[in-house]
Image (cartoon, rainbow, N blue to C red):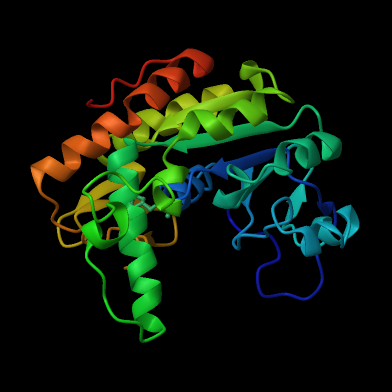
C-alpha cells in the first residue's frame, strides 16, 4: 500500500498502529524482501519496512507487545499489516511466541531449492565478512570437511533443512494458516506467486501483471507503482559462487531425505533436484 501519513508527524485520523495479522517468517534468502515489496503493491496491505526481529530476539521480545505495535505502520481498519523477519523461521521459540500474540495469524513461508538457497546464503555471509575485512573463503572451505564430506555444522547448510524447522511451526499452526511461496518461481513468474498469496490472504486480486517488468540490467523483475518504478537493492541478486558438479551433487544427496520429509509435512512436492 501507499504509506499513510508519510512525512507528517501527525497520523491521519482513522488510522492506527496495529499488530500484524500476517508474518513472512522466512526463509532467509528465499526471496523474503521481494515478496514483501510485491505484496505491498496491494492497497489493502501495509508493510513494516524494517525487520523487527520481535519473535526471534529474546531482548526484543521482552519489550512486549505494545512496543512491537509501536513499530507498526499506521493503517486504516481493514488493511493488513505484514511484517517480515526471515530468522523467525529457524528460531525454536518463535512459533509459540507468535501463537501467543495471535493464534489466527497468517504465516507466509517462501522456500527455494535448498542448494540454491545455500549458495545465496554463502554469498551473503561472505559479503558481510568482507565488510568486516575478513579474508575471503571458498565455498568448499566452509561447506565441506577436509575429508570431502558435507559439513553439516555449517549454519547455512542447516538452514536449508526446512523440515527440521517447519515441524515446530506445525506444532502451533495448522497448515491451513501457512501459505508456502515458491521462491524459485517468484524470480521468473512473480505475478502468479503474488496472485496465489492474495487469494490465501482473502484479498481482492488487485496487484496487476503490468506492475512487474523485467529489468535486464538488474536481471530481475522490478516493480511499478503509481508514483515510481523500483528494483530491489544491489544486495538482492548477488553473484553466487561457482561450485563443481561433484560438490553440488554431494549437497543434493545431503538434502534429499530432508526435502522429502518437508514435502510430506507441507503437503506439497517442490521436486527440487536430487
Ligand atoms: P540472491 O541474492 O542470491 O540472488 P531475501 O530477500 O530473503 O534475502 O532473498 C534474496 C533473494 O531474493 C535473492 O537471492 C534473489 O534471488 C531473490 N529475488 C526474488 N525476486 C527478486 C527480485 N525481483 N529482485 C531481486 N531479487 C529477487
Q: Residue at x 35, y 34 (%)?
A: 191
Q: In the figure, residue 120 lies in which quadrant? A: bottom left
Say if 10 sits above or below 163 in the image.
Answer: below
Q: Is residue 191 visible?
A: yes
Say if 158 sits above or below 52 in the image.
Answer: above
* Left or right: 210, with 98 as reference point: left
Residue 128 position in % (x across, y down): 40, 73
* Left or right: 123, with 214 as reference point: right
Which is nearer the eye, 178 or 195? 178
Quadrant for the C terminus, please: top left
Residue 61 position in % (x across, y down): 81, 56
Which is nearer the eye, 40 or 152? 152
* Left or right: 220, with 230 as reference point: left
Q: How many marks?
A: 0
Q: In the figure, residue 272 lies in which quadrant? A: top left
Q: Residue at x 31, y 33 (%)?
A: 254
Q: Residue at x 79, y 34 (%)?
A: 99
Amino acid at each position: 500500500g501507499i504509506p499513510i501519513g508519510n512525512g507528517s508527524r501527525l497520523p491521519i485520523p482513522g488510522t492506527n498502529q496495529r499488530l500484524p495479522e500476517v508474518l513472512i517468517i522466512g526463509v532467509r534468502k528465499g526471496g523474503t524482501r521481494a515478496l514483501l515489496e510485491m505484496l505491498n503493491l496491494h492497497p489493502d496491505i501495509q508493510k513494516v519496512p524494517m525487520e523487527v526481529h520481535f519473535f526471534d530476539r529474546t531482548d526484543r521480545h521482552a519489550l512486549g507487545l505494545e512496543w512491537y505495535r509501536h513499530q507498526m505502520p499506521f493503517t486504516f481498519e481493514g488493511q493488513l499489516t505484514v511484517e517480515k523477519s526471515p530468522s523467525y523461521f529457524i528460531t525454536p521459540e518463535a512459533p509459540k511466541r507468535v501463537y501467543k500474540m495471535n493464534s489466527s495469524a497468517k504465516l507466509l513461508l517462501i522456500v527455494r531449492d535448498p542448494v540454491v538457497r545455500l549458495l545465496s546464503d554463502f554469498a551473503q555471509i561472505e559479503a558481510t565478512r568482507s565488510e568486516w575485512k575478513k579474508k575471503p573463503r571458498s565455498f568448499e572451505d566452509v561447506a565441506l570437511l577436509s575429508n570431502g564430506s558435507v559439513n553439516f555444522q555449517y549454519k547455512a547448510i542447516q538452514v536449508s533443512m526446512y523440515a527440521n524447522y517447519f515441524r515446530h511451526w506445525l506444532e502451533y499452526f495448522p497448515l491451513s494458516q501457512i501459505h508456502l511461496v515458491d521462491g524459485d518461481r517468484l524470480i521468473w513468474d512473480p505475478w502468479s506467486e503474488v496472485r496465489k498469496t492474495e487469494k490465501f490472504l482473502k484479498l481482492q486480486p488487485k496487484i496487476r501483471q503490468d506492475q512487474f517488468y523485467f529489468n535486464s540490467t538488474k536481471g530481475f523483475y522490478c516493480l511499478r507503482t503509481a508514483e515510481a518504478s523500483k528494483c530491489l537493492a544491489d544486495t538482492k541478486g548477488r553473484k553466487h559462487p561457482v561450485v563443481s558438479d561433484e560438490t553440488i551433487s554431494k549437497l543434493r544427496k545431503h538434502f534429499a531425505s530432508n526435502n522429502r520429509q518437508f514435502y510430506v509435512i507441507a503437503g506439497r512436492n517442490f521436486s527440487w533436484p536430487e
